[in-house]
Image: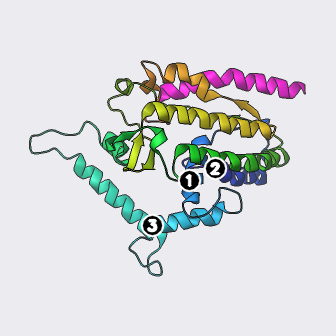
Amino acid sequence: MSQAGVLSHIATVKYLAERGDRFDLVVLATNHNDASWSRRLSEIGFHYDPAQFPPGSVEIFKREFEQAIRPETTSLRTVAWVRHLMRVAKLSQAATPGADGTKPHSIVVDGLRLSQKGTQLLPRAPIGNCNGDDAPDRVSADIYGEWKEIFPKFRQDVKQLLGADLLVVSEPAAFAAPSESFYGSDLRVFLTCKTGEGVRAINLDDAAASQRERARLYLDAARLAGAETFDLAAAMEPVADGPEGGSYFFDSIHPTPKGAEKFADLLRPVLNATLDRLHRN
């Protein structure tokens, strides 16, 4: 689910329970989105927890969509549609042949380049130069504390409402993949942070190490809550960092069909073994 984190899935669990659905096992993989929400909420003085997530997310969207408008006369839905149409228009214009007859190879690629917010164009910097609240190490420390508070309640809800056990899976990334391994174009969204010289893109090797540590913290918090865990990110590293690494991902984190198939190959024996063990107990 796009942008959904563990707090979003609290509502999912309740919805499924109200429908009468029951499961043996629920698999959760929200590492990347959890960290993003934690950072965004901290910027407006909120924490990533069940009580503050609804009002905090509303405040974030209001700030994003109510800029330069009069909220009493214009709905957020209207603003969202206007911005969407403007973006489509820009993409269509970008795909129009130029004076020399050339044309971008794909409007989809142009759209993805736009959506990654130009992070590839920023000057690079080592992660040690990050000195603001958006520093990855700071974000990881914050979300680790929040995970330790959230996971016990989430696991309890999964068990009580759905009758299921919980398996928490880390999310692979392709920061360390060779640029030439991506299909057609390297569309990775670089991690960024504030430094003394301004906003910078974090060196890819540092970004990969940071994501590896965040995955470790994610699984550690899940284990402390008594959940089953599997480090899918570590299992993917040999291919994700290899010469064909980019063929498994569209960008930094979203898998291609080949990547999704590899995820399934790695998860299948883990799911079977976990279910067998749970049924024996």
Q: Quadrant of the C terminus?
A: top right
* Left or right: residue 146 compared with residue 123: right
Tags 1 and 2 in contact by the CB under 8 Å rule? yes
At numbered mark 2, what does the secondary structure look like: helix, strand or loop? helix
Q: Report which quarter residue 178 is drawn in.
A: top left
Residue in the image at 39% along x and 50% along y = 199
Image coordinates of residue 65 in percent, x first then y, are 45, 66
- Disc on res. 169: none
Q: Label 2: few (<14), some or many (≥20) within 10 Å?
A: some
Residue in the image at 11% along x and 40% along y = 101
Give the mark nearest the N terminus, 3 or 2.
3
Mark 2 highlights which residue? Answer: 142
Q: In this picture, is 55 found above or below 24?
A: below
Image coordinates of residue 147 in percent, x first then y, are 70, 46
* Left or right: residue 76 compared with residue 111: right
Residue in the image at 49% along x and 35% along y = 207
Give the mark nearest the N terminus, 1 or 2.
1
Is residue 128 at least partly visible in the picture?
yes
Is residue 175 at least partly visible in the picture?
no
- Disc on res. 65: 3
Q: Label 3: few (<14), some or many (≥20) within 10 Å?
A: some
Give the magenta-colored segment's residue range: 255-281
Mark 1 highlights which residue? Answer: 39
Image coordinates of residue 97 in percent, x first then y, are 16, 44
Residue depth check, mark 1 versus mark 2: number of the one nearer the observer = 2
Task: Tell me the amino acid under the disc marked 3.
Answer: Phe
Gap in Å between the C-alphas at discs 3 and 2?
A: 27 Å
Q: Residue furthest right?
A: 281
Is residue 175 in the magenta section?
no
